[in-house]
Image: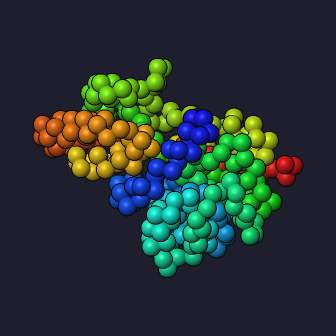
């Protein structure tokens, strides 16, 4: 976890790539939402609170299932696109910081998809607890890069360019395989406010051409924060190398860990 000031700086970068984020970030598997509903004992039209909805990737699947959702999103452009994408559903998109926002009523579920790690760790569990009704649940997950044994070798091959531009992986970094992402159960329960009731892992794959893959990288905070010359060097080499491939594309494997925790009544 980066220091508070660095986390806040990187957190602010996503709004610059709002339209691109909507186009290239992956959708989550439908089975994840079916499991979430069952594990959190939700029934439409329960009220849900989403933390950091971005453009609505994790909002639409639940809105289509009949839930009423309030989303708190920091970025103005992200919130604007979310409102467009979610028009016609029972969804309210509020622009603001979850750490400071006060819920008008209790919710049955507070959830965050690829956003929880950007929320201040000193207050996020307390804020979620305060937003939930008795017996309510917290659910968090994130789309992450995983590396199956038969995965695309491109990511290892392109690492030399990251090393060259001074963006090497930190010492001790590992490439997790599908189903082997850490579940962070201990962190949730260490808050003293929640009991983890279930952990589920999911994996899926998407194929990207050079433009799509560079677009995807351009929605990641680390790449958005790079100096222009670094991005130009990296993206140019990605285009060159993928052009040499027969299918001109790259396969990226995604993984997610769904953690569902029940609100404890002694908080």
Relative side of 106 to 248, left or right: right
Which residue of the protein is positioned furthest toward the top in this rendering?
A: 171
Q: Quadrant of residue 160?
A: top left
Relative side of 217 to 258, left or right: left
Residue 16 x, y percent position in the rendering: 42, 55
- Nearer to the camera, 227 or 164: 227
Q: Is residue 36 visible?
A: no
Which residue of the protein is positioned furthest toward the right in this rendering?
A: 266
Residue at (57% x, 45% y) in the render: 8
Colour treatment of the image:
rainbow
Relative side of 53 to 165, left or right: right
On-image quarter of the N terminus: top right
Q: How many marks?
A: 0
Residue 33 x, y percent position in the rendering: 54, 58
Residue at (41% x, 59% y) in the render: 18
Residue at (35% x, 47% y) in the render: 218
Q: Is residue 199 visible?
A: yes
- Nearer to the camera, 37 or 105: 105
Residue 195 x, y percent position in the rendering: 75, 44
Residue at (36% x, 26% y) in the render: 166
Residue 219 x, y percent position in the rendering: 39, 49
- Nearer to the camera, 6 or 150: 6
Q: Quadrant of residue 159?
A: top left
């Amino acid at each position: 976890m980066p220091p508070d000031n660095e986390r806040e700086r990187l957190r602010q970068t996503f709004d610059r790539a709002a339209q691109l984020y909507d186009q290239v970030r992956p959708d989550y598997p439908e089975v994840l939402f079916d499991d979430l509903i069952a594990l959190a004992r939700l029934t439409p039209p329960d009220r849900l609170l989403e933390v950091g909805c971005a453009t609505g990737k994790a909002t639409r699947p639940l809105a289509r299932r009949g839930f009423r959702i309030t989303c708190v999103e920091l970025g103005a452009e992200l919130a604007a696109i979310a409102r467009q994408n979610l028009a016609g559903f029972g969804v309210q998109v509020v622009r603001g910081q979850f750490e400071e926002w006060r819920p008008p009523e209790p919710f049955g579920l507070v959830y965050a998809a690829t956003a929880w790690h950007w929320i201040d760790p000193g207050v996020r569990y307390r804020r979620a607890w305060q937003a939930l009704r008795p017996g309510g649940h917290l659910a968090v997950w994130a789309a992450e890069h995983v590396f199956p044994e038969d995965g695309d070798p491109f990511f290892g091959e392109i690492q030399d360019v990251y090393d060259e531009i001074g963006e090497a992986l930190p010492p001790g970094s590992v490439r997790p395989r599908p189903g082997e992402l850490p579940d962070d159960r201990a962190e949730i329960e260490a808050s003293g406010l929640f009991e983890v009731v279930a952990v589920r892992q999911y994996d899926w794959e998407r194929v990207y051409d050079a433009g799509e893959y560079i677009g995807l990288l351009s929605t990641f905070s680390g790449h958005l924060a790079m100096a222009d010359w670094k991005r130009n060097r990296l993206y140019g080499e990605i285009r060159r190398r993928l052009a040499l491939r027969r299918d001109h594309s790259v396969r990226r494997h995604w993984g997610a860990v769904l953690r569902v925790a029940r609100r404890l009544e002694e908080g």
